[in-house]
Image: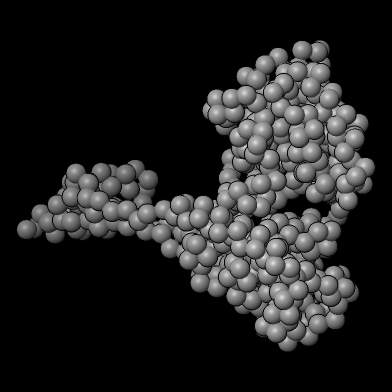
Amino acid sequence: MPVFLDSAEPGFDAAFGALLTAKREESPEVEGAVDAIIADVRARGDAALVELTERFDRIRLTPETLAFSETEIEALVAKVPAAERSALEIAADRIRAYHERQMPRDESWTDEAGAALGWRWSAVGAAGLYVPGGLAAYPSSVLMNAIPARVAGVGRLVMTVPTPDGVADPLVLAACRVAGVDAVYRVGGAQAIAALAYGTETIAAVDKVTGPGNAYVAAAKRRVFGRVGIDMIAGPSEILVIADGTADPDWVAVDLLSQAEHDESAQSILITPDAAFGRAVAQAVEARLPALERAAIAGASWRDYGAVIVVRDLDEAAALSDRIAPEHLELCVDDPDALAGKVTNAGAIFLGSWTPEAIGDYVGGPNHVLPTARSARFSSGLSVMDFLKRTTLARMTPGALAQVGPAAETLAAAEGLGAHGLSVRLRLDRLNEG
C-alpha cells in the first residue's frame, strides 16, 4: 500500500520530508565500472565497443556492423504497421510545430553610448542521442530528442540504442527515419556515451549528448560532461496529481499507474483536499493493477513509493507541489488555470482532467524529456535551446570607448590587472592625441 499522509495530523512535516528525501534511484556500485568502461573505449575504440557489446548485449558485432545499414533499417521500418507509422508522423508533426515556436531570435542594437551590442544563435555541430533498450522500447524518446535538434539546425545527428540479443525495435528505427537521424549505432550503456563523447574509429565524437538511460548511462554522462554537453542526469519517472472532488477517481488512478509502470523506482503521488476521494483513488489503483501488462512493475512502484496526501485546501496543495517539484504535474481540478498560476516548480503541467500526462508523452507537443528528482526547482525540460549556443557581439566606436573606457580602466586597476587597464588606456591616449 502507498503512504497515506494528512497535513492536519501531528508529524506530517517529518513524514513529508521523509517522502521528499527517499532515495529512489538504483544505487549499484557503478562508478568504478563506468570509469573502467570509459577508459577502455578511449584506449581501444571500436575494439572495446565490440567486446563490451558482446558481454552486455550478447551480440557479436564488427566495426563494420556497429551501425545499422540502410538495408537493415529499410527492412525493419517495413515491418511497422501503417497505423503505428501514421501515429508516429502525427506525433512528429505536433512536436516539430511546438519546438519551432521555441527558436530564439538574434538581436542587435546601439546603446546610448554609441556601442553596437547584440547576440546571435547557432546550433551545435553534432549531437548524439541515447535511446534505452531492454525493458521497453521508446520510439517517442527518439522523436523528443531528435526533432528539437533538427529544428535547432544541428548538422550531424546520430543515435545509439542497445539491441540485447540482437533484437531491434522496428518502431524505434521508423522514428529515426521520421525525425531525420543520420546514423544509428547498436551500442548501449556507458560504452555508448563514451563513444559519443570521445569518438572511435567508426563513431565520430559529438558536441552534445542527450537522452535517458540506466544508472550506468547516467554515471557516464556525468563523467563526460565538460568534454561534451549533456541535457540532464535523468532519474526515475514521477507524477504528481492534484485533484479535487470534480475529478474521476478511476481516471486519476490510471494516470498514477501510467508512471508507476515505467519503473519499480518510479513515484506516483496524489494530493487532494478530499480524504474520501483519496481513498477512492487508492481503491481504483488496486482494482486496475491486476489487468496491467506491467502489473508487477507498477505494483512495486505504487507499494514502495506511492503516496496519497490529504490537505486543507488547494493553496496548500500548490505549496506542497512546489516542494516536491515534480517531473509531471496534473491538475485535475475545477479551475486548473488558477491553480497553475500558484505553481512555480514543475517540469510540465497538464491542465484539467481531459489532459492526461500520457498525451504529453506522445502527441501533446511539448517535450517529454523533463527534470526529475526535484531538479525542476532549477532546470527545464529538453528544448531547442539545448542544441543552441548564444554568442554575444559588441563593437565600440571611438566615441563609445571614450565614454565607457575610463570606467573599465578604473575597474581593471581595482582588480590589479594592469594589462587590462593598459589595453583600454592606449586607445584612450590615441583618441586624446586626436
Residue 8: % across, % down:
77, 12
Residue 350's quadrant in the figure? top right
Q: Quadrant of the C terminus?
A: bottom left
Q: Is residue 126 above or below residue 409?
A: below
Q: Nearer the viewer, residue 304 or 76?
A: 76
Residue for point 89% across, 40% down: 289
Q: Is residue 324 visible?
A: no
Q: Is residue 144 left or right of residue 406?
A: right
The image's colouring method is: one colour
Query: In this rendering, would 49 be left or right of 88?
Result: right
Residue 335 falls left or right of residue 388: right
Residue drawn at (70%, 46%), measured in percent from left and top?
358
For image coordinates 86% across by 53% down, the residue present is 28
The quadrant of the rendering that contains the N terminus is top right
Q: Nearer the viewer, residue 400 or 199?
A: 199
Q: Position of residue 90 (x, y in %)?
A: 60, 58
* Residue extending furthest toward the front: 82
Residue 102's spot in the image, x, y percent?
A: 47, 51
Tell me the quarter of the picture where residue 193 sits: bottom right
Picture coordinates of residue 414 (x, y %)?
A: 34, 43
> Can residue 87 be seen?
yes
